[in-house]
Amino acid sequence: MDYFLTEEQQMIVDIARQIADEKIIPQRAELDEKEEFATEILNEIAQADLYGLYIPEEYGGFGGGCFEVVLALEQFGRGCVAVATSFAASALGAYPILLSGSEEMKQQYMPDVATGKRRAAFALTEANAGSDASGIQTTAVLDGDEWVLNGTKQWITNAGEAQIYSVVAMTDKSKGARGASMFVVEDTDPGFSCGPKEKKMGIRASATCELIFKDCRIPKDRLVGRQGSGFITVMKTLDLSRPGIAILGVGLGQAALDESVTYAKQRVQFGKPIISFQAIQHMLADMAIQVEAGRSLVYAAAKHIAVHPKDMTKASSMCKVFATDMAMKVTVDAVQVLAGYGYMREYPVEKMMRDAKILQIYEGTNQIQRNVIGQELNKEYT
Amino acid sequence: MNIIVCIKQVPDAKDVRLDPKTNTMAREGVESIMNPFDRHAVEEAVRLKERHGGTVTVLSMGPPQAEAILREAVSCGADEAVLVSDRAFAGADTWATTYTLGKAIEKTGPFDLILCGKQAIDGDTAQVGPGLAKRLNIPYVSCVRKITGFENGAILLHRLMDDGYDEVEIPLPGLLTVVKEINEPRVPSLKGKMKAKSLSIRILNAEAIEADPDSLGLPGSTTQVVKVFAPEFKGERAMLEGTVDEQVEQLVNKLEPYL
Amino acid sequence: MLKIDIETCIGCGVCEEECTFGAIEVIDGVAVVNEKCTLCGSCVDSCEVGALSIESKEKAVQVDLAEWSGIMIFAEYRHGKVVPVSFELLGIGRELADQQKVTLSAVLLGSGLGDAARDLVSYGADIVYQVDDPALEYFTDEIFGNILEDVVREQKPEVVLAGATAIGRSFIPLVATSLATGLTADCTQLAIRPDDGVLLQTRPAFGGNIMATIECPFTRPQMSTVRPRVMKAVQQDLNRKGEIINYQPQPERLQSKVKVLRSVLEEQDQVNITEGEIIVSGGRGLDNEKGFELIKQLADAVGGAVGASRAAVDSEWIAYPHQVGQTGKTVNPKLYIACGISGAIQHVVGMQSSETIVAINKDPHASIFDVATYGIVGDLFEVVPKLIEKIKERRG
C-alpha cells in the first residue's frame, strides 16, 4: 500500500532495503549459527548515514524523527531481527542522553554515535527487576567528585560491543520510584565489566550479557538530567523506542509472509502448487492482513509520536503489542506453510519464529503494555 | 588523483530470456541496472579518492535513461557525472563505442586514471577497456584484482590470470579494468543520495564531442549482428525406466566403456 | 536508423515476430519502431515486401579483401608449456583453412620456447612465426600486442583467432583496435559463409541466455577470441611438415610501459577439473554439504573429478574451482554425470560438449534431460548409492 512517503523518506527506505538485501540477508543464517555480532553490517549502516538517523543535525546526525527510524528499522528487521536489534539498541542507549542530558553531555557523546564510531546500550533490567523496574538494586553513591556504582545488570543488549552505556541506578532508596537516576558509563571506566554472552533462543547474533559494576567510579558530570529523574527518563526513552521494536515485528512478519507465498507457489503437491488450496490461501491471507494492519498502526503511532511527544504512551504501547503479537503468529504460520522444510534450519523461517518471541518480551512485556494501555484508557475517559 | 569511471546501464542479464518459439527477448520485468562490474569500478575509484584525494567523474555512453546509473554512482561517492548521449550512437559495436568514449574523454578534462568494469553483462566482450586505452594511447591492465600501492606516479596491482595472478606496475595516466573480487561495493549514503538528486549532469552529444559522424553507431561499426537466437541443446534423451535397481543396472551397462 | 516505408508496408506483422527485442510492432495496420531497436537488421531480411531498410551510408569497403588470405592463430605459451587452447585453435583453424584452401599459421611468443613450435606443426600449423625473447617471459599487453600487430600487417591473414583466456581477452582487443578491425569475443562456433567466404562468429551474450552470430564484413582481418574447451584439436601427427620462422621484431616493439614484477601460481588452481576424462557434478538437489559427500564418493568410484553447479558453490558446499558453467569452467570430458542439477542454460553451456552426459534428477521436466545421453528420473539419494555399489562391483 502507498503510505505517501516524502522523497527523503523514500531514500531512507531504498538505502535500508539495499542494505538488507545485499548485506544482511546473505549473512543472516551464518551470523545466527555462529552467534556473531554483525560489526561489518553496522559499519555499513553508519557509512550510509543511517546510524545517526535520529540524532539532531547539530551533533552530526540526520535529524530524523521517530517515523524515519521506523522506516529504516522495518527493512533491517525484514533482513534479520538480530542485526536490526543491535542497531535499535544503540538508539535506545542514546535516547536518554538526547532526552535528558545536558548540552555538554550531548556534545560529548552524540557525534560519535551519529557516525557509528561508538555504539550505545541501555541498562535497566536486573535479575530481580524486570517488569517491576522499581525493584532495581544497583546503587550509585556520590563520593567526592565521583559516583560509585555497585550492582549487576542482566540481559543487556549490545553489552560488550558498546562503548557508551545508559545505566539506571538507585541514588536514594527511601524515595522509591523517585530515587533512581540515569548515568553514562563508558566501557573504559574502572570497575566496569561484562559477563559472558548469553545463549538465547533467538536473535542469536545480538550480544546479550550481564553488566557488572564493582565500585565502578565515574565522574560527577556523568549524571544524566536531575538526580531522582531516572525512571522518568526511562519511561520517555521506552515510549520513544517502542515503535522501533514494533516495526521489527512488521519487518519480520513481512519477511515470513514473503517466504511463505514464494514457497507456496513453488511447492507442488497433489499435482498443484499448494497456493491453489484454500487452506493455504486463507492462512496467507490472514498473514497478509495482519502484517499490513501492523504496518499501518506502527506508521500512524510513529508519526503521532513525532509531533506529540507529550502524548506518546498509549500509541507507543498499542503498536508494540499488536505488531509483536502479530509477528509471533505470522512466523509460526510461516513455518506451518513451509511444513517439513520450514522446520529445517536450512530454510529461513524457523529462525524467524525463534526471533519473533523476544519481541513480545523485551522493552516491556506485552502484558505490561496492556496494563499501560488500560491505565491510559482509564485516564482518558472521564 | 583525478579518476574517470566508465559505466554502462544494462538489462539485468540473468533475467533476460529468448523465447525459442517466438524468437523474442522477454524484456518485461527485466530491470535496468548499473553493470555489476562497474559498481566495483566506482567503489575502487571512491576508495582511491578517499585515500589520495582528487575527484571521481563517472561517464556513461547511453540513452537518456542512463542518467539513473550516473546518479546512483554519485550517491555512492562519485563527484561529477557526464552522460554521452545521441541517437547517432545507436547500434555501436565496441569499435564505435571506444571511438565515442575516447572523443568524450578528450572533452572532460585531464585525468590520472580511468577505471572500467572488466565486461558488461549484456555484451560480455571485455573489449571496451583495452580498446579505449588504445584510442587514448595510454597503458592499461585488465582484470585487476587488487590495488596494492601508489607511488612515484605508478600504481602497483595484482592482475588476475587463469592460473594465479601477476604483480604488475603501471605508470599513470593509465586505464584499469577491474574484476568483482577487488572490493565489496558500498550502498549509497543518505547524503550521497541527496547530492545525486540535485546534481547537474553534463550531457555531451555527437556535436559536443566533435565526432566524425561516419565513425558513430552502426555505420561506424566494424562488426554487425547477423542473427540472434536461443541456445539449443540436443541430447539423445534415452530415459532409463524401471525400479531403481533396474535403472542403475542399465546405466552401468551403458557406461562399461568408461569404467 | 530503421526506415519504414509506410506505403509499401502491408501490416502483416512478420517483422514483429522476427524481432528479438520487441522493438517493432504493427499499430493501426502499419509497422512502427521504438527505442529498443538495435539495428540488427533481422526485420529487414524478413520483410516480404521490402518495406524496411536500415539507412546507412553505402560503406566504402575499407580494404581490398582479396589481399587478405590465410588463417592465423595466436598460440599461448605459459610457464614452459603450450596452453591447450592453442591446439583447439589449430583444430578449428585447420577446418577453416581447408575450407578456404589457404594456409594455417600460428604466432608463438615466449621466452625459452624449446620445441613448442614443432608441437604446433604436429597439431596442424603450416607455418609458425616464433619470437623467443626474455622480454616475453611475462605477458604484457603492449609487447604481445605490438608483435602480433606487426606480423598481421605483414602476412595479411583474413582471419585471426586467439583463445578467450585471460591473456587473449586482454590484448586481442588492443590488436583489433590498432588494426582498425572488428573483434568478436568468446566464440563458441565459427563457420565460413559459403557465398562470400565471410567468417560467421557465434557467441553467447546476456550471460549465456542468448546466442548471437556476428560478422565483420568490411575490414580485415576478421578477429575472434575462442572459448577454451569447445573446439576440438586434430589428432597429433608427429610426421607433419611445417615451416618454423624466427620472427625478428623491431627493438622498440619489445618495450612496455607496464611492467610485470612477478607471476604467482595459485594453489587453488591445482584443482583442475578441465583435464579429467570423467566428471561427476552435483547441484542444488544435493540439499546440503553432507549430501554433496555423495558426489565425491561417486567420483572416487569412477575415478573422476568433482564438478559443481553454481548453486552448490554459492551454498558453499564446494569451492569455486569446481564450478562448471558460464561463470565457472567449460569442460568436455568423455563422461559427465550430473546429479541434482536442473540444467539451467548457464550450467549446460559449460558442459554440453561432453561426449556422454548422464543426468539424475527427481524432476522429469528438468532441462538437464534435454542434453543428456542417458537420464534417470529418481531420488538421487537412492540412485547414487546403488550406482556406487554397482560400479565398485563391476570394477572388482
Image (cartoon, rainbow, N blue to C red):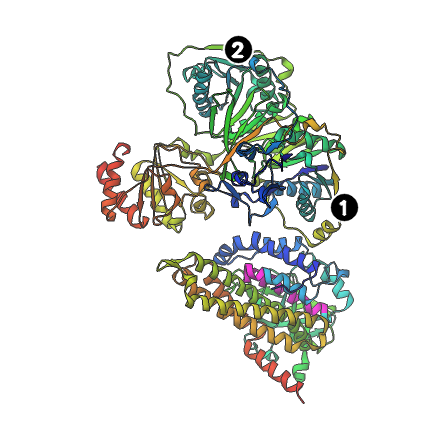
Q: Residues within 10 Å of mark 1 (few under 14, many from 20)?
A: few
Give the distance between the C-alpha atoms of the residues marked 2 and 1, in whole angstroms. Answer: 58 Å
Image quadrant occupied by the C terminus of chain C: top left
Q: Nearer the viewer, mark 2 or mark 1?
A: 1
Residue B35 visible somewhere in the drawing: no
Q: Chain of mark 1?
A: B
Quadrant position of residue B150:
top right
Asked if the stretch drawn in magenta spans residue A191, the answer is: no
- Kind of residue sitting beneath label 2: Asn
Q: Nearer the viewer, residue A44 or C85?
A: C85
**The residue stretch that appears in magenta:** A76-98
Left or right, A103 with respect to B21, comes to right
Q: Which mark is residue B200?
A: 1
Left or right, A330 with respect to B101, comes to left
Which residue was labeled with disc 2?
C246
Residue A81 at x, y percent in the picture: 55, 62
Residue A382 at x, y percent in the picture: 67, 90
Left or right, C70 with respect to B147, comes to left
Asked if the stretch drawn in magenta spans residue A94, the answer is: yes
Residue A110 visible somewhere in the drawing: yes
Check disc 1 and report its element: helix, strand or loop. Answer: loop
Q: Chain of mark 2?
A: C
